[in-house]
Image (cartoon, rainbow, N blue to C red):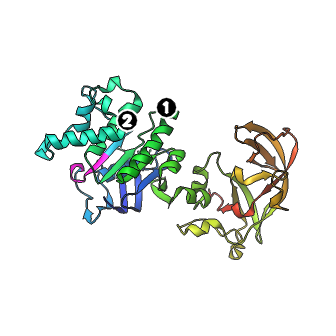
């Protein structure tokens, strides 16, 4: 059981700043997911935690111990990689136990007991006598997990471990990882570029961009209260609509609509260094341009949600896409386009006009992009 603390952690490779001053506490027993686009510094962060990279600056603590400059073997963490990293010429058992009896840290009896336990937990007993080429991708990843858990490490560090699996197996393994975590309770840092994986696995999710933390929150809070435009667009599929507006006395003004903004913005409630202005901030009078963010499922056909009252504007239907459980409607209003979610069997004609409504509590306002 371990708490991991990062203080102002920084890593430069020549002129690239891969990790730019991270401050973060991974709580004891927590499943923390780090998510962000390719190149944002996720793997480097994990490799710094593992001791596979040396920090340029800052500190890594595991409980009270400063491990910043220590070797991987002195950290008692187990890493699980995307490509499984199994030795092809060794059986499952040898792969799981490789290196365990070096230095006499475990007796043969202890190793056998741990392997049997791990094999039962992961349902890999049948794989122990097979070599990796005789295993499927999912089986290889289970063996790689077996190697991680027999060591009973203080923390698991997982780098995109499900990325090489097909979509169906990935969903199954996601659930299995959640169960495994519930069973073992080991502090886990899990890196992925996939926001669905982050949302489903993480007790808390760290969103990174450009070497920096953008927000740390439980998944639903990230979704409901994104701290800035980057998080708002990265989390959620289909992505949040972003429409350029002017803000005049608490009203978002567009050529084609005027949407009154509620006082106070939910995004401010996270208190996580939000860049978001209060929606109807009376002090923001001199800032006339903003970006209105609204998720497709928070826009509705007025006829399907009469309960939302008088908040309506007209839009033109461009294209409809049946998703099975809903209908995704691409619309335009003036020079803006947006997507909205309608009941699955709604009949809508492209080119036709629809009346659109929304829940004003679920609107977001962001700074306009600069430059
Ligand atoms: P991610 O895991 O989010 O895709 P990485 O941590 O791998 O991102 O990389 C972050 C940045 O650091 C990228 O610009 C990448 O090119 C750079 N980088 C990573 N490792 C090295 C390295 N060994 N040498 C030089 N640049 C690196």
In the image, residue 186 lies at what x, y percent?
34, 53
Q: In the displayed structure, does residue 23 sit left or right of residue 284?
A: left
In the image, residue 242 lies at what x, y percent?
69, 53
Tell whether position 75 is magenta. yes
Q: In the displayed structure, does residue 115 sit left or right of residue 359?
A: left
Residue matched to label 2: 141
State if disc 2 and disc 1 touch (CB < 8 Å).
no
Residue matched to label 1: 166
Neighbour tally class for label 1: few under 14, some 14-19, many 20 plus, Cα within 10 Å:
few
Which secondary structure, mark 2? helix
Q: Is residue 5 above or below residue 50?
A: below
In the image, residue 143 lies at what x, y percent?
33, 35
Tell whether position 288 is magenta. no
Residue located 15% across and 45% down the image: 106
In the image, residue 139 lies at what x, y percent?
38, 31
Instruction: Read off the magenta span.
Output: 72-78
Q: Which residue is farthest top?
A: 134
């Amino acid at each position: 059981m371990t708490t991991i603390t990062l203080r102002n952690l920084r890593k430069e490779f020549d002129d690239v700043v891969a990790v730019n001053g991270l401050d973060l506490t991974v709580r004891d027993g927590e499943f923390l997911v780090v998510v962000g686009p390719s190149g944002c510094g996720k793997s480097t962060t994990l490799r710094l935690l593992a001791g596979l990279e040396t920090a340029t600056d800052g500190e890594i603590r595991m409980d009270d111990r400063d491990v910043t400059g220590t070797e991987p073997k002195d950290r008692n963490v187990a890493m699980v990689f995307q490509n499984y990293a199994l030795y092809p010429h060794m059986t499952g058992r040898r792969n799981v136990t490789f290196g365990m009896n070096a230095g006499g840290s475990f007796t043969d009896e202890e190793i056998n007991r741990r392997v049997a336990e791990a094999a039962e937990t992961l349902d890999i007993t049948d794989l122990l006598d097979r070599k990796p080429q005789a295993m499927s991708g999912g089986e290889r990843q289970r063996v790689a997990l077996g190697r991680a858990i027999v060591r009973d490490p203080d923390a698991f560090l997982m780098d995109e471990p499900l990325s090489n699996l097909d979509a169906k197996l990935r969903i199954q393994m996601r659930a299995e990882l959640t169960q495994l975590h519930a069973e073992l309770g080991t502090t886990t840092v899990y890196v992925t570029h996939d926001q669905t994986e982050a949302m489903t696995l993480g007790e808390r999710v760290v969103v990174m961009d450009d070497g920096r933390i953008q927000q740390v929150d439980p998944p639903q809070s990230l979704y409901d209260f994104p701290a800035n435009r980057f998080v708002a667009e990265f989390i959620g599929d289909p992505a949040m609509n972003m429409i350029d507006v002017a803000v005049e006395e608490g009203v978002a003004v567009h050529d084609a609509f005027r949407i009154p903004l509620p006082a106070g913005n939910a995004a401010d409630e996270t208190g996580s260094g939000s860049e978001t202005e209060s929606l109807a901030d009376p002090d923001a009078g001199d800032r006339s341009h903003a970006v209105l963010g609204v998720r497709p499922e928070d826009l509705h056909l007025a006829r399907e949600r009469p309960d939302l009252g008088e908040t309506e504007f007209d839009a033109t239907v461009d294209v409809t896409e049946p998703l099975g459980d809903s209908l995704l409607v691409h619309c335009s209003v003036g020079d803006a386009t947006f997507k909205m979610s309608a009941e699955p069997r709604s009949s809508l004609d492209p080119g036709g006009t629809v009346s659109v409504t929304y829940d004003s509590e679920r609107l977001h306002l962001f700074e306009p992009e600069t430059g």
